[in-house]
Image: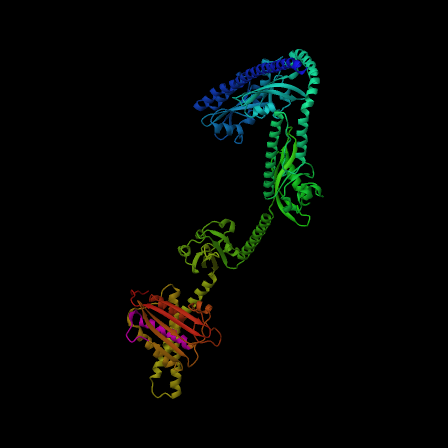
Amino acid sequence: MLIAGLPFLLAGMLILLWLLPQISREIEGRQLQLARSVAAQVSSYLLTPQQQAGGLALLLEQQTLGRAELQQVLDAHLAASPTLMALYVVNAANRIEVVGLPTALQIKRVDLLGLDLSKNRLLQQARQAGAPVWSDTFLSLMTEGLSVAFAIPTADQVLIGEVDLGQVSGFLQQIFGGSDRWLLVLDRHGQVIADEDGLHTAQQLNISNLPLVALGLEGAEQAHGEFLFEGEEYLGSLVPIPSLNWLVLVALPVKQAYQTVGTSLGITLSGLLAALAFALVLAFILSRRLAGSFEALTSHARQTAAAVPSEPSVWPRANILEFQALADALQLMSNSLRERERQLATLMSNLPGMAYRCRPDAERSWEFISEGCRALVGCTEQELLSGSWPGLNSTINAEDLPEVVRQLNWQLERQQPYQLIYRLLNPLGGYKWVLDHGRGVVDQQGRLSCLEGLVTDITAEQLADEALKKALGDAQEAKDRVELILRSVADGLVFTDLQGRIVLLSASAEELLGVKQQQAYGLELGTLVASPELQALFSSLQQGDGATTQLELAVPGTAPGAIRDLEIKSALVRSRKGASVGIITLLRDVSLERQLDRMKSEFVSTAAHELRTPLTVIMGFSEILLDEHGLADHQQEYLGIINEKAEVLERLIDDMLDLGRVESGRIVHVEKGHCDLVEVIRQAIADVQLTHGQHRFDADLPTAPVVLEGDPLRLAQTLENLLGNAVKFSPAGSLIQISCCQNGAVVEVSVRDQGVGMTPEQVGRVFEKFYRVDSTATSKQGLGLGMTIVKNIIDAHGGKIRVESRPGEGTEITFCLPLSVVSTST
């Protein structure tokens, strides 16, 4: 019976298989042809105003028209064009220079002129492409309806034309009105921009979610198929408009498309169903013979699905050759699936974290968990699936959960992969910082079906990041504290980089320099304190001289004509590794001190000149009286004392006059000639021994003369001062050592005593005028000018002098003189 019915059934199926595709191809061909025709007409309809505007673009390139003439040309062009709604000329500064509008809209011209379009995407694309481009659809400011625009770039201007899409719908009504088909024009985003009756355009409908439209948006040259829209099935054809990157969709209800063949198909199907009913009875009897093999294979498939994956599976054999081939194929598939499942399990176990699959509910309920969950939450996958933690969200710290849910929902709504950082709880207490990155899986209907992702442990990185933030905060706090300390220093403090640019000023430095930190930052210190000496000081430091340098400058004061004396000390600042990182400079206003020094010097000089005249008279008469005979012994003694003290006073006056010359900027006057330094030293020692016999003197002098260019009287004065200080500050009976030796081109003279010695601070000030190491009422006599004059005498001879001393261990003063010096005097 089956064999008898099969030919009829086969004939009917062949008819159906030939007829239905033929009908579908015919409908598809007609619709595609119609869609191409509409696309060509729409393209011509919209490109016509673009081509007409191209002539205006040529006029812009030639720049032969003035603004007023160009305005008239644009208005006339709009009056002649049924589709153009506005024309804009944008200049090189991206501003609207000329606007062409229809008569009804010309009132809006004032609002548009000068409008900045620098952020307009169409303008940017036209300038970048260098060719005409079309925009996406937009809501027009002119008519408040849907519009589209084209842009034509010229040499430095851009011509933009705006087209009302309502005119396009009217055009479609003219060429397509009264048809039973459905016609839509779509933009590049699937938005309906025109249809034959304007209904869908007014709704601003977007049908990009239709599979047929999505296929066209992806770049298909043409597409045809069925789709469901507003509860009704349609048969649609889609073709692109290449020049505009738009689409034309022609659709016909499926019922209407196949209505013409419905009756024929019904008769054919009725016959086929009768034949099939007859054949099924026979087929049921024959199928029972074949069902046994299928049942065996089905039963084994169920057992295999429930078995442990690692267990082997052998499929049952069959007597029929085809069924045996099917069993062999199933055996091969089973083995392949088992091997892939093993590979997947190995891969999951080696992942550095926990892979999961969960449902998109409030708990993110588990569907699958990898073995990595044990290291993160201390439970196996079976314990999690059957335990008190029904989902991934239940394992998250309660403080982090609201933010995690918010970020997750935000990313899922945008169909983007998500990355979340939160604390994952552990049943034994504590938590771990984890990074959860995954994405939502969407089914064919566009619904979110599940979430898949990977959770990895980032506790170490998070703790390191927190430690780094704390360290940076501590460093900033320390920096602020140091800056506060520096800005409160009494002396002016300036920190500059190695190029001399100001980085930091203390408050006192701001007052001294008359500028604020914000104004001085980045300026060179030389621009605020203009001085060649300061530039030389900084150059020396920049060349790597690590010693602290000091100088004193006279700079203009705040009052007109006033002068301030600044003492400047600078030193390199080095990092822990020894690298130079900047220069620190201390500024000290010593104007008052220098003024007092000048007043003191003027007083001393005046007093010295005033005292010399009466002193000369006293010394003269005392010497005359000493030469007189017949004076009593006590008279002779008194006159000797008067003459001796007058000589002491004369030396003090000479020191005061020498100091006056030094203060006036002149070096001590010397008269150089050939002199034997050894003989000068011997004579100085002999003179001191006559008056200070209670001290012991040890002289280590060369046997041969040491001849140099020098002033013997000034050198004798130097030695007299040094020996006098040694005797003055040494106990009676102590040893005073004098040495002289030649060292190459210089000769060194040293005077060492065993006296009270000096501190480092006293050594640093020993050459200051009027400075006395012991200024108490019981101190030795003197004005504190001796060492100042000594240094000036040595400087006048081109030599150097140094002092070495320690409290309680005595003092050693050494000066060096060149053996051959060009004779100079001031």
Q: Is residue 443 magenta?
A: no
Q: Nearer the viewer, residue 43 or 87?
A: 43
**Compared to 274, does 114 lie above or below?**
below
Quarter holding the N terminus is top right
**Compared to 413, does 142 lie above or below?**
above
Which quadrant of the view contains residue 768? bottom left
As drawn, which residue projects farthest toward the right?
388
Q: Nearer the viewer, residue 447 or 322?
A: 322
Tell me the residue at 66%/27% (across/down): 293
Where residue 155 appears, as percent x and y from the top left, is 45, 26
Whether residue 614 can be seen here: no
Tell me the residue at 34%/85% (across/down): 628
Q: Is residue 100 left or right of residue 2?
A: left
Q: Nearer the viewer, residue 738 or 771?
A: 738
Q: Is residue 336 left or right of residue 388?
A: left
Where residue 512 appears, as percent x and y from the top left, is 49, 56
Which quadrant of the view contains residue 438? top right
Which quadrant of the view contains residue 719? bottom left
Q: Nearer the viewer, residue 169 or 408?
A: 408
In the rendered view, how is the structure colored? rainbow
Range shown magenta: 701-727
